[in-house]
Structures are given as structure tokens and as C-alpha cells.
Image (cartoon, grey):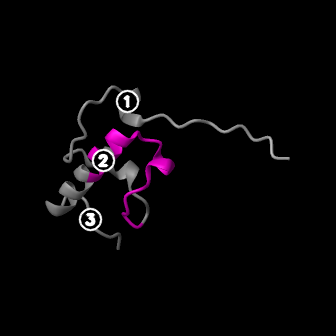
């Protein structure tokens, strides 16, 4: 029997009372992409649905204007 305690993940944006996800804030956005610069799932990061959608849009915008790379080299 596995008796590991499962810790519920909290949404980073809800906990820190951040209303909008800014595409220019690359330091924060890098926390939510993997080593190959793929957007991590909300199960992995613990963000809520609303902020996960805003996060994905912000990452895609910052990639287009070359603040974040599309792939890691």
C-alpha cells in the first residue's frame, strides 16, 4: 500500500494575486516551459484553467516577438 500524501498544487497567479499574465515578463514565463521550451501542462504546473489559457497566449506572444525562443538549442 502506498501511503504517500498528495500535495495539492496552488495556482502561482492566484496565490500571488496577479491579475494579468504579461508576455514581456520572460522571467516568470520561463517557469512554465520545459527544457525543450514546450508549454507545461496545468497538471504539472498547478495553474488554474483561467490562468493556464492566459499563460499559453502570453508565451506564444513572447515567442513571436522573440523574447522567448521556440526551441532550446
Q: Residue 12 placed where, x, y %?
A: 41, 35
User: Is 65 placed above or below 46 here?
Assistant: below
Q: Of tags 2 and 1, which is closer to the observer?
A: 2
Disc 1 crowd rating (10 Å Cα; few below 14, some 14-19, many 20+) is few
| In the depicted structure, whether residue 50 falls above or below residue 44 | above
Q: Which residue is mark 2?
A: 53
Q: Which mark is residue 14?
A: 1
Cα separation, mark 3 vs mark 1, equals 26 Å
Q: What label does residue 56 carry, if any?
A: none
Quarter where residue 68 is shown = bottom left
Nearer the camera: disc 3 or disc 1: 1
Q: Earlier in the sequence, mark 2 or mark 1?
A: 1
How many C-alpha atoms fall within 10 Å of the one at disc 2: few (<14), some, or many (≥20)? few
Q: Which residues are magenta?
A: 36-56
Image-based side of 19 in relation to 41, left or right:
left
Q: Is residue 28 left or right of residue 58?
A: right
Where does residue 13 sit, x and y in percent of width and height?
35, 34
Q: Is residue 50 shown in magenta?
A: yes
Picture coordinates of residue 44, whole percent (x, y): 50, 50
Q: Earlier in the sequence, mark 2 or mark 3?
A: 2
Mark 3 vs mark 1: which is more N-terminal? 1
The CA distance from mark 2 to mark 1 is 14 Å
Q: What is the quadrant of residue 7 in the picture?
A: top right
Q: Observer-nearest residue: 16 or 73?
A: 16
Q: Taking 5 as reference, is 72 left or right?
A: left
Q: Residue at x 43, y 35 (%)?
A: 11
Label 3: element kind: loop
> Residue at label 3?
69
Asked whether disc 2 touches disc 1, contact meaning CB atoms under 8 Å apart, the reply is no
Amino acid at each position: 500500500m502506498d501511503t504517500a500524501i498528495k500535495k495539492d498544487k496552488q495556482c502561482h497567479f492566484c496565490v500571488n494575486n496577479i491579475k494579468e499574465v504579461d508576455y514581456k515578463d520572460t522571467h516568470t514565463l520561463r517557469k512554465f516551459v520545459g527544457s525543450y521550451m514546450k508549454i507545461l501542462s496545468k497538471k504539472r504546473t498547478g495553474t488554474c484553467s483561467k490562468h493556464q489559457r492566459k499563460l499559453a497566449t502570453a508565451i506564444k506572444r513572447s515567442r513571436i516577438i522573440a523574447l522567448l525562443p521556440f526551441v532550446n538549442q
